[in-house]
Amino acid sequence: MAMEERVDTNKGQMKIGFIGLGIMGSRMAANLQQAGYELIIYNRTAAKAEELVKKGARLAKSPLEVSQKSEVIITMMENPQAVEAVANGENGFLNLSGANRLWIDCSTVNPSFVNMMAKKALTKGFRFLDAPVAGSKAPAASGDLVFLVGGDERDLKEVQPLFDIMGKKTIRVGEHGKGASMKIVVNMMMAQAMVAFSEGTSLGKSMGISEQALMDVVLNIPVSAPFLSAIRPRMENRDFTPNFPLKLIRKDLQMVSETAYENGVSMPSANLAKDIYTRAMSDGLGDQDFSSLFGYLNK
Ligand code: NAP
């Protein structure tokens, strides 16, 4: 990459590196490809890159090769260890002079980790945005994610066209780490809403109320989170095909615990929720959708 001040987001000119082609990343990358961007991609399990390669993406042998051949690098990894592996591991993409390249990390990872990564990136000459997303598999596929961004306003403006392809809304929360901070607040509340709903229906059934009656009432008054109505059919049909795997919400609650510890705040109910998801995971539900907690507590 030339040492220009800014990258050019014109489709014909800009090469985008995309690392992490799981449930979310594969769909986000597909939307960028569909919009005409040239992609250089990497995934630990290369087979998951096949669809994108068939449509013209170049498969890199390592994360380092991705950064050598792209101006903007997007990562969508499972957890901090996975981000660390592709960024700083052997052949990690930060093993290169950044030359003003822009790294956008969309993974849900904890704010103190994000701040550490931002520092490392800047030291290497990369610019950095944390941009975790609200929205699951379907919004990732339809380009309707909401990006929660931390970082420099000018960097965000420069890559806004990419966020507009992958999402329907971009919110700059503040400086580095603030996108990640907002994201763990959102997921902490979502995790607990699922626990409260699942326990509530279990209590209702123990008193002889039908599951249908419980859902009809609880999901149509303001006590329940709106996302629960959206996934009602899947819960009713006990279809827990992973959109957002249960092991990932547990990971997010662990990041809530760590952040609360770092900031000296008490999070008793979030820690209890984490334990409930941990129990479900040790009973084999880690790779099922997180809504399988409903089935778990409503056997
Ligand atoms: P996923 O399907 O499990 O994909 C995780 C990705 O991380 C895969 O590319 C995986 O590679 C890679 N990975 C894991 N460990 C690695 C390691 N040690 N080294 C290198 N690569 C590694 O997860 P996802 O659902 O796409 O979620 C990605 C991120 O978005 C997570 O942080 C999640 O919390 C967040 N998120 C998910 C949703 C959702 O609804 N799914 C919604 C919002 C945010 P392999 O393919 O080789 O395993």
Image (tube, grey):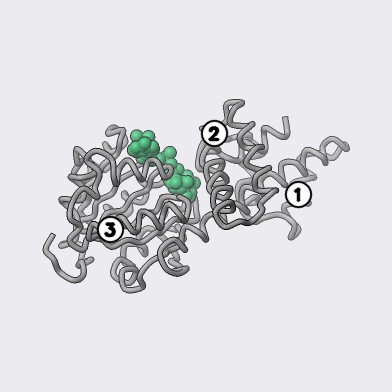
Instruction: Name the spot of residue 222 as percent of width and height, x first.
Output: 74, 60
> Residue at 42% across / 64% down in the picture?
149
Give the secondary structure at mark 2.
Answer: loop
Question: Does residue 56 appear in the picture of this structure?
Answer: no
Name the amino acid type tagged 1.
Asp
Q: Nearer the viewer, residue 92 or 213?
A: 92
Instruction: Name the spot of residue 191 as percent of width and height, x first.
Output: 62, 47
Image quarter where the N terminus lies is bottom left
- Tag count in the figure? 3
Q: How crowded is mark 2: few (under 14 residues within 10 Å), some or many (20 or more)?
A: some
Residue for badge 2:
288
User: Left or right of 64: which side holds 247?
Assistant: right
Image quarter where the C terminus lies is top right
User: Left or right of 60: which side holds 181?
Assistant: right
Name the amino acid type tagged 2.
Gln
Front: mark 1 or 2:
2
The residue sitting at the top extreme is 283
> Residue at 18% across / 71% down in the picture?
5
Front: mark 3 or 2:
2
Instruction: Return the disc, 3 or 2, that comes first in the chain's sequence.
Output: 3
Q: Which of 221 and 212 is in front in this view?
A: 221
Tag shown at residue 35: 3
> Residue at 65% across / 37% down in the picture?
275
Name the amino acid type tagged 3.
Ala
Q: Nearer the viewer, residue 187 or 170?
A: 187
Residue for badge 1:
216
Give the secondary structure at mark 1.
Answer: helix
